[in-house]
Each structure stands twice: as C-alpha cells, then as structure tokens.
Image (cartoon, grey):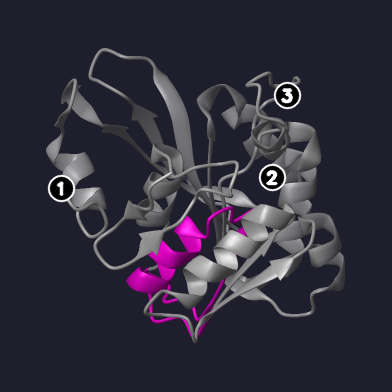
Amino acid sequence: MSPFQFKQFTIHQDRCAMKVGTDGVLLGAWAGITHNPQTILDIGTGTGLIALQLAQRSSAHTVDAVEFEDSAYEQCVENFEASPWADRLFCYHASFQIFAEEMEEQYDLIVSNPPYFNTKAASGDPARDLARQHHMLPFTDLLQGAAHLLSPEGQFATIIPTEAEAAFTNIAQNLGLYAQAITKVRGTPTAPVKRSLLQLASSPITPIINELVLEEERHVYTAAYRTLTQDFYLKM
C-alpha cells in the first residue's frame, strides 16, 4: 500500500490495520487547542496520524501516543521518526488501561479516535477487526483513563458514532467530564448525521453545538470542510 502524503508529513500504513480515514483527519484538525496545550496524548494512535496533526498545529513540547497492537506501534514509531517533529513525539507500546494505571504525567489535551463496534466485526482482516472492537477499549475505560490523566484545565477530544453520543456523554458526566463543544458531522446536506466530534472538560457549561457537512455532492467538498482540513490534505 502506498504511503498517504499530507502537506507536512507522510503516513506509512502498510502494516497498520486501521488506515488513514476521514474520522481521524477530522479529529486531528478539529480538536481545540485554544488553551495552548503543552502536553498532548493520543490514545490508540494507530499510524500516529492524529498525534502528527496535533504536533503540526500546536507548540506542545510533548506529544505522546499509546498503541497496543505490535505492527501499528512499530509503524507509528517510524512515522514519528520521519516527521519534522520527531523530537516532540513519543509512542508507548501498551494497552491504554495499563498505561493509565502506570503513567504519572498529566496531559493538557487528550485525543482518541476509539474503536466503536459493539459486536464482532467481520471484515475478513483479523488485525482490523481487533482494532475496531469496542470491547478492547470500552467507553468507560477510555473516559476513566482520560479523566485520570487530564491536567486540571485539560480537555479531551474524540469522535464517535452519533448514535452513541448520549451514552458516552452520560458516562463522561458521571466521571466529572462535560461537553464543551459538539460538532455533528454529515456526509452531504441531505445525509443523516453519522459522527459526533466532542470536546470535554471538567467545567459544566452549556456546550457549543454546530454541524459540519463534508460534501455538497460526490467529491465536491464544502467550504467548511476545506477550511478545516486545508493545512493537511494536498488537494484542499
């Protein structure tokens, strides 16, 4: 498989089950950094895409990632080392549950594009199926770990199926994390909303809620989507 070329970095993905996809690019471009995070963590980083996007977008001195799957971990390390920000990027080889138990550092921004299938996937690719299994990193484990690792003013950003949004935010609130911003994503103006981008923090406020449409029609991207991703995609 050919590498995926972005404007400032390259993603090699031939040994990683989860390839570069719209969800990851959206999260890496959307996650809020107005609070100027100096420490960032990407949970379940895969190829390292989102961590690399945030290294490009921010002045954070530490951009860590954690990845459980062996081949994905190795490929992430190679992508990090080949990037312009190799001195700020580091990937840990561990499950997030173990990482959250053992890590003493706190992070100003935590991001995750988590697995989201509740039932066994059947793509025919065992590694891909494993990467997408919800039971490998349940929402409760993800949110408990994030809440534990966030700095006092830290924020957590993720992208999940919209159908899971209510359950996800309910778990989060029980752990003291509240939605600050929600962007609902639909493919075209008439398509149903399929994804929710969420940014959470410890302050209980009324969240800013908006919508993002990706395409006016097939391969005709909206101005909003182009603006969001123009620093990354070559053709934007």
Q: Nearer the viewer, residue 182 or 105?
A: 105
Q: What is the crowding at mark 2: few (fewer than 14 residues within 10 Å), some, or many (at least 20)?
A: some
Distance between mark 2 and mark 1 Cα atoms:
39 Å
Q: Is residue 141 left or right of residue 236?
A: right
Residue at left 72%, top 80%? Answer: 105
Please state the horizontal and vertical placement of residue 175, each as a whole percent of the image. 76, 51
The residue pinned by badge 3 equals 118
**CB under 8 Å between discs 3 and 2:** no
User: In the drawing, what numbered circle is on residue 173?
Assistant: 2
At a point 73% along the width and 52% down the height, the residue shown is: 69
User: Which SS class for mark 1?
Assistant: loop
SS of the residue at dot 2? helix
Q: Is residue 109 above or below residue 126?
A: below
Question: Which kind of residue does numbered mark 1 sit on?
Answer: Lys
Which amino acid type corresponds to the residue marked 3 in the rendered image?
A: Asn
Label 3: which secondary element? loop
The tag earlier along the polypeptide, 2 or 1, is 2
Q: Residue 235 got which mark?
A: 1
* Res. 182 image quadrant: top left
Is 112 a magenta residue? no
Identify the magenta region: 34-62
